[in-house]
Image (cartoon, helix red, strand yellow):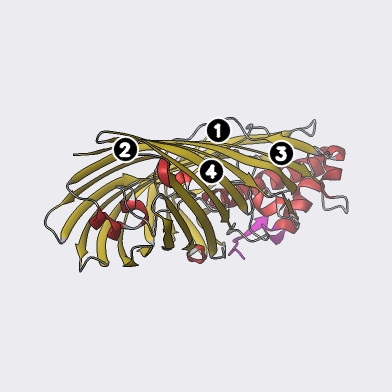
Amino acid sequence: MFRLARFRDVQCGREFRISGVCRVQAFSGGGEGGYGGFTDFSGERRGKMRRKGLLSGLFLGLFYFVSMSHGAGFALYEGSARANAMGGAMVGKADDPSAIFYNPAGITQLPGTQFMTGGTAIIPRTKVKTSNDPLSRREQTTPTEENVWLPPHVYLTHQLTDQFYLGVGLFSLFGLGTEFDPNWPGRFNSYKAVIQTLNFNPNIAFKINDQLSIAAGFNVMWFDLELRNKILLGFNQQGRTIETDQRLEGDSFGYGGNVAIHYRPCQWASLGVSYRSRMDQDVEGRAKFDGFLNDTDADGSITLPDEVYMGLAIYPMPKLSLEVGAIWTNWSTFDKLVIDYDEPLAGRTSRVEREKKWEDTWRIFFGAEYKVNDMLDLRFGYVYDQEPSPDEHVDYLVPANDRHLFSFGPGIHWRGWTLDLSYTYLMVADRTVDSNGRFFTEGVLDSEFEGGHAHLIGLSVSHKF
């Protein structure tokens, strides 16, 4: 899978590849027992093995940088509290300022000038049970650290004429936040990963007639990441690990476009389709090390996937609306990851490449809204969301699987103001991961992802001028 350089073992006078097998030999003395032999090293042989362990550990750490760049899917769909409460069922409806997120063609339904702002607090938790650990030789269950992530949203729409409408949005399309104890068994793969994005998205919409509208826009996305893991350098004379910390920080800007259509063939139904293009992010930053290695500038390339939103809304009675739809995400754009270092690490490697081969996914949603009176709306929704990472590439960035989301929330209207609230419970299906020896190349152990869940609390405030 990797192009690996050859190095010479001066003491033994032979060439060897830095591969999974050679790492076992380096740490264990080449015996059948894997890591089991390192506590028995003595004299000259122990010195040789420690030098080999240091060299292979350095290169093991380089590959961890790449595996940390992407894990499970990290798209965000929390465009507003109203949409959250209905499972994102705003593609066919698209009748408030958050249509800029879900279907910008729908802003032709918004007269005058309208504004919305808010955010969604995301509180994720999960546990990872690791086994077959060659270092600790025991099972261990590690929970994620408690964190709260808050992707924001801001929208403004304005009617120019009877046919032309403008809309602009500022929101997050992608994000990731996963943190473990720095000394947990999977630390050589990842113990902290944070990805933040902010997307600026102006749109123009054209009302062809009372039934059909179209829209187009462009996207400018700021992308920021912080990735941390440990590097195993070798062992001391007591057989304890020698480790160092590495941190990769960087950001970039990417550019893309979007188009949308909204069609209402009759009073009791409307449908919408919206497309957002993929975005190339050429991240530039700094690789920092806590001893043993020199800090250096680094850059890498990431292709964020294009997405298609589809929704059909029906209005069986004046106070009730229902919507069903789907979002297709082209995660197969993640076929390869590349990181380049300005200065070769350990004087040997300046580029690391790795295949990912993610799979495209579907997110299926259903939502309902009931207008109790002029002041109060009640909403609920359900979502089934597929996981893109295949078993052979899943890691600890987001220890996840397919997800189910259950949501509800009210909308409160007063004069020209609206307060929308939402609560969503996200449940992640348990997953068993067979590492297939990937500890020596990626730091991944035999694992069980258990009890994954998240609480999402949304709030939006909007005003019609």
Dot 3 falls on a residue whose secondary structure is loop
For marks 3 and 1, give the CA distance. Answer: 21 Å
Real-space CA distance between mark 4 and mark 2, rounded to the nearest whole angstrom? 20 Å
Res. 123 in view: yes
Mark closer to the chain start, 2 or 3: 2
Pinpoint residue 129: horizontal percent, then vertical percent: 75, 41
Q: Quadrant of residue 275?
A: bottom left
Q: Is residue 91 magenta?
A: no
Q: Which amino acid lies under the numbered mark 1 shown in the image of this protein?
A: Gly
| Residue under label 3 | 185
User: First in sequence: mark 3 or mark 4?
Assistant: 3
The magenta span reads: 1-19
- Judging by the rendered image, the residue that carries numbered circle 4 is 407
* Kind of residue indicated by mark 3: Pro
Q: Nearer the viewer, residue 411 or 135?
A: 411
Residue 17 placement, left or right of 207 = right
Q: What separation in Å lies between label 1 and label 2 (alpha carbons)? A: 44 Å
